[in-house]
Amino acid sequence: QRIGFVMVMFGFMLNVRHGIEQRHYGVILLGAIFGAAAALRQMALHVIPDTPAYGSPIFGMHYYTWAFVLFSATVLGVAILLILWKEEWQSKTYEITICGRWVCLLTIATVGVNLLSTFVECGPFECPANPVRYWLFN
């Protein structure tokens, strides 16, 4: 799911950095479909009766369920954007603004912090199904 979110974020960052292009939306769709499949797999693991859910629910749904909802909404939103696509949206003389640069830096920093926190939690190994402590502080 994290990889899916990073791919979605990277696709939107490409639009901010290089201007709006259809192929950037392809990256977003690939990331959203990959993330939705991972979230759906995790949801399916908890469908079996008496199987405990992991983590505290947020507004009645767990993180992996929210991830599936967000990935599905992303696929739907990007599909609508591609259906409504107009060629004039693709600008050949695009220049990134200072705000766009900050958005890109914030995106890269967010991914870096996520990678660091995942390494602290799981180390170089696969993350446990229900982590209760940090690998680095064990």
Image (cartoon, helix red, strand yellow):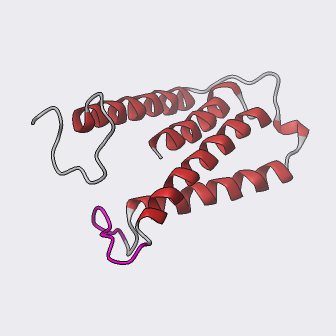
The residue lying toward the viewer, choosing from 63 and 106, is: 63
Does residue 89 appear left or right of residue 100 in this picture? right
Quadrant of the rendering where the C terminus is positioned: top left
The residue lying toward the viewer, choosing from 132 and 94, is: 132
Percent x, y for residue 5? Answer: 51, 43
Residue at 81% over, 29% down: 91
Vertical placement of 48 versus 21: above or below? below
Report the predominant secondary structure element of the magenta stretch: loop
Does residue 115 appear left or right of residue 138 in this picture? right
| Residue 21 visible, this angle | no
| Residue 81 visible, this angle | yes
Residue at 43% over, 63% down: 45
Vertical placement of 122 versus 124: above or below? below
Residue at 40% over, 35% down: 110
Percent x, y for residue 119? Answer: 28, 31
The answer to which quarter of the image holds residue 126 is top left
Residue lying farthest to the right in this orientation: 87
Vertical placement of 70 versus 51: above or below? above
The span picked out in magenta is 48-58
Residue lying farthest to the left in this orientation: 138
Vertical placement of 36 versus 61: above or below? above
Number of marks drawn: 0
